[in-house]
Amino acid sequence: MAILNINNLKKEYGIETVLKDFSLNVNQGESVALIGPNGSGKTTIFRIITGQEYFSEGTVSVRNDIEVGYLDQLPDFNSELTIYQELEKVFAEVKRQIKEMQRLEEKIAHHGEKAEESEAHSDDLETTMREYSELQHKFEKGVGYEYQSKIRQVAAGMGFDEEEIHIKTLDQLSGGEKTRVGLAKLLLMEPDLLLLDEPTNHLDLKSVEWLETYLNSYQGSLLIISHDRYFLDNTIERIVEIKNGRNEDYSGNYSYYQKERKRRYEQRLREYKNQQKKIKELEDAIEQLYIWGRSRDSEKMFKRAKAMEKRLERIDRLEKPRLKGRKMKLELDTEIRGGDDVLFVENLAKSFDDLKLFADLNFELHRSDKAAIIGDNGTGKSTILRIIMGEITADQGRVKIGTNIYSAYYRQEFEGFNPEDDLNTALQRETAVTNSKARDMLASFLFTGEDVFKKVNQLSGGEKSRLRLLQLMSGNYNFLILDEPTNHLDLASREVLEEALQEYQGTILIVSHDRYFLDKVVDYIYELDRQELNKYFGDYSYYKEKKKKQIAAQEQQANEEQKSEGKLDYEAQKEARSQEMRRQKRLQELEAGIERLEKELSALESEMTAEKNIDNYELLQQLKDDYQTKNDKLEEYYQEWEELI
């Protein structure tokens, strides 16, 4: 049964039509995603549903008994309240019921203390008891006394710990933290129709995965705007794409949408080509009839030509289908090769006041490596990038950048723009190009027409992201350091960025919560957990699978230890744990050794095939001997690794 109906909606901003003939139905208990390029009208639809925006044509109806919940991008909070107090406001009615039950309990107890048993007294007691019973039934039917644990559960899911929610006031929170409080409050309200606009923004991976689990068991209906493709795959059963102001429906998650969109495109392209062929045949036939009519002075031929022209006019012409709309063009080239050793981080430590982020961090990057740092919010991922770039100083350790390495830094809130610059000027500050060339480059990033005269301070978050990416593309960098590069980018732009980074020959270090993006781009992952950095030799899916196995192994070990507690003495248990720690340490050493030897063998292969060494037989023999020695060592490492795994 439909709880929301939108039919033939039209919405205009001045002379620009954003939505035309847009329709959408959401059924009870259904989870639907709205997708489309930035500026296609997704958030506008939410604001129309909640009555915050008008529309010029069409109908919008929400079933009368339906409560709609919508998270405002700028939640209005009482800044003096703690996080817990703000979330507790959701349960104002529950708290009122508790107070009323306490009042009735006292009244009943007071009746019991009276000795007299007048008829009026008895009637009053009976009325009070009935009132109490009804209220208690209503209370128990709802969330009841569990509301406090529910607040803690949802707050923890949003990344707030038990102590934090009772101590931190809302005026102490960042914008992202306030958004998380707003989302937690909305989830606690449990409206019948939940409207979520980019709910995974400002959430770390752990919170996103918690939210996915929560929404999959949600009893109400969901209408979600998101560019997080992994999230859409895990939570959505239907996708509505906004295309040229109209709706196109897909009965499946994001992976289904990708396949089905391509199938529909190919089918429509065939239909378009067939129609074009038919139109061409008719046009050729009409032209031939006119030629014959003129040459033979035949009125009959002219009549046949005109009849055929009318037939041609009646054809409902199909638009040429496009698989994708306008998208930015991004090519990340580097002419400077740079050294094989790009980055060394040794014994890095950083604290802010009493908060210790990490200590004794060690990692390195080599030419063409594509790595990511992941971890919970507040663990220090962005801090590591800022230390590498020299923006802040480490408490301990050192960072060494390799020879001929030219780095570029993309961060979430880039502050290097002059807000009064127009786009041409902003681009020319980074690269020496003519006005004409700058405009061509801006056009490739979807800044066309009057857009180029906009001031930077007039740009949206997504537009600023595109401008910063264009600046990076314009420079000759061989080491890219990217902090949440997909934030503010729509799905099409994310795909373009992924393709560009896959082809990029330089080195990349990324901080990102976009799991789909990580799977497409990175070769290995560093997890920042409990102030330590752990390396996983694969993409996000590999990391996730490895973590599952590690957790399962730890649980199994704990169970076995618990079972054998009575059988093993203290020294035996200690030795067993020590052996396991030695095994894990040796595995890490072997994996690092394998990676190092493979890089060294690759470098030796390049030397052995280099044209400059082709006649140097003595050097070639040395290289060959070195290659054989390292290759034998690599085989030993592989065998030992297989035995230990």
Image (cartoon, rainbow, N blue to C red):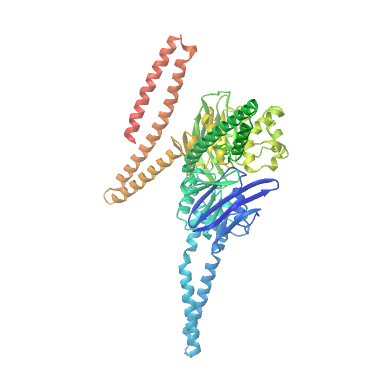
- The picture places residue 544, in percent across and down from the top left corner, at 43, 42
Horizontal side, residue 311 vs residue 589: left or right: right
388 to 228, vertically: above or below: above
- The picture places residue 195, in percent across and down from the top left corner, at 55, 54
- The picture places residue 125, in percent across and down from the top left corner, at 48, 83
Which residue is found at the position 46% from the left and 17% from the top? 607
Residue 395 visible here: no
| Closer to us: 403 or 399 | 403
| Closer to us: 584 or 461 | 461
Which residue is found at the position 29% from the left and 44% from the top? 572
Which residue is found at the position 37% from the left and 26% from the top? 634
169 to 320, vertically: above or below: below
Q: Quick one: quadrant of the C terminus?
A: top left
Quadrant assignment, res 50: bottom right
382 to 89, vertically: above or below: above
Residue 576 visible here: yes
- The picture places residue 177, in percent across and down from the top left corner, at 58, 51
